[in-house]
Image (spheres, grey):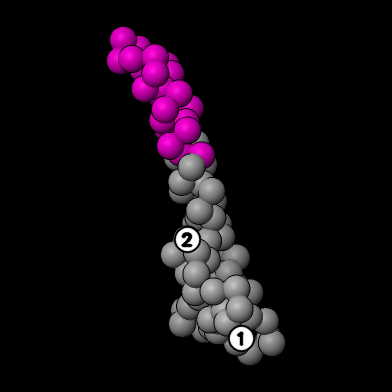
Amino acid sequence: TIRNPSYIKTKHGNKLLTGGWWGVARKIHYTADLVMALSWGLITGFDSLIPYFYVGFFTAVLIHRVGRDHVHCKEKYGADFDEY
């Protein structure tokens, strides 16, 4: 919650939030972005795969970004990120 957030205190003195929306998903807006991209394809029907290229491309980009974020956080927080 905003008043009493839950977090992990790292060895560097930083705080990693673990509760609220942040505890569920760090980038929750990506879900809305993916739904919107899929909707744009769905409104065109199923006669062509071209309208679905965007949602496929966007999904690939986000999966790649998640991997990069995990590597970056592991390097930055070390064992604290494993606990997180």
At a point 36% along the width and 22% down the height, the residue shown is: 42
- Residue 6 in view: yes
In the image, the segment drawn in magenta is 33-57
Q: Are marks 1 and 2 in contact (CB under 8 Å)?
A: no
Going from N to C along the chain, the mark reached first, 1 or 2, is 1
At a point 30% along the width and 15% down the height, the residue shown is: 46
* In-image side of 21 versus 77 (left or right): left
Magenta stretch secondary structure, dominant: helix
Q: Which residue is mark 2?
A: 25
Type of amino acid at the residue the image marks with label 1? Thr
Q: Which mark is residue 10?
A: 1
Q: Residues within 10 Å of mark 1 (few under 14, many from 20)?
A: some
At a point 42% along the width and 27% down the height, the residue shown is: 39
* In-image side of 79 versus 12 (left or right): left
Does the magenta segment cover residue 43?
Answer: yes
Q: Does residue 3 sit above or below 69 in this rendering?
A: below
At a point 60% along the width and 73% down the height, the residue shown is: 2
